[in-house]
């Protein structure tokens, strides 16, 4: 069964069941869900979760389905930088906050730039790990547009290690996926890294 089929097969709890689960967690934490300050907390938490995890209801490939071919022969890379995102770690369900750089080298077809940001948003609004999210964005863009190359670079801070665990504030993680021309052509890759300001970063020093 594919990941998409797994999602479709899931039976979602009701709103009432979700609120009951929040009340259970409040009791587990040591507080009284019946006290005045917490009476409406379950409803608020469930409402916020609906926003945090809205990406499950959208098909990322459908977002990229409308493309444009009238580009007057444009054949240089297209880069959208510093796309801010907020996601949640699938291991601890705490925030991952950062930015995504998305680039592709078109082959006849382009997509509206807002769709690139929307693609990031759909995958971010799910329980995630940064590595998987990087691959999902790049591979979906490559599969749907079939460009000459795709690159995705994500820089993010993970509260699962800044506010708990090792408590290392100020630490950021960088992940990347290079496909096609961005993997095979060093000149193209270096041009992208220069555009997004990471040409001198140790991770890419030998690119």
Image (tube, grey):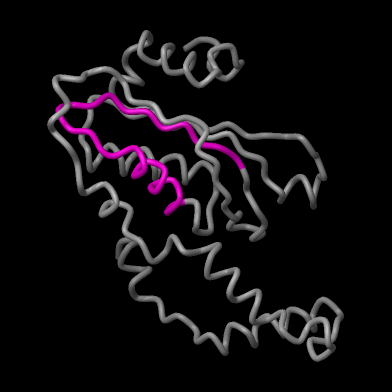
* Position of 59 relative to 203 (above/below): below
Residue 186 vertical placement versus 101 (above, below): above
Magenta part of the chain: 98-123
Q: Quadrant of the N terminus?
A: bottom left
Q: Report the number of numbered marks.
A: 0
Q: Position of residue 131 (x, y in %)?
A: 51, 41
Any part of residue 137 in sight? yes
Image x and y of residue 13, in percent? 49, 84
Expressed as whole percent of the image width and height from the top left, the position of residue 198 reads 55, 18
Q: Residue 147 vs residue 166: left or right?
A: left
> Is 56 left, or right, of 203 in this rendering?
left
What residue lies at 36% left-to-right and 68% top-to-bottom? 6
Q: Residue at x 65, y 88 (%)?
A: 20
Q: Quadrant of residue 197?
A: top right
Q: Image height check: is 105 above or below 1?
A: above
**Depth check: 204 or 123 in front?**
123
Front residue of 88/78: it is 78
């Amino acid at each position: 069964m594919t990941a998409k089929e797994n999602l479709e097969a899931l039976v979602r709890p009701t709103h009432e069941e979700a609120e009951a689960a929040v009340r259970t967690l409040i009791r587990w934490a040591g507080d009284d869900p019946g006290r005045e300050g917490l009476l409406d907390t379950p409803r608020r938490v469930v409402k916020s979760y609906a926003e945090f995890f809205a990406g499950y209801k959208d098909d990322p490939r459908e977002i990229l389905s409308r493309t444009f071919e009238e580009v007057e022969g444009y054949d240089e890379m297209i880069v959208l930088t510093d796309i801010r995102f907020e996601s949640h770690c699938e291991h601890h369900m705490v925030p991952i906050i950062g930015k995504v750089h998305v680039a592709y080298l078109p082959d006849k077809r382009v997509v509206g730039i807002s769709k690139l940001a929307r693609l990031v948003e759909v995958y971010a609004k799910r329980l995630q790990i940064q590595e998987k999210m990087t691959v999902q964005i790049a591979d979906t863009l490559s599969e749907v547009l079939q460009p000459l190359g795709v690159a995705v670079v994500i820089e993010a801070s993970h509260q699962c290690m800044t506010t708990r665990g090792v408590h290392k504030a100020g630490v950021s993680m960088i992940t990347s996926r290079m496909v096609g021309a961005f993997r095979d052509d060093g000149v193209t890759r270096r041009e992208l890294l220069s555009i997004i300001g990471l040409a001198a970063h140790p991770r890419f020093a030998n690119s």
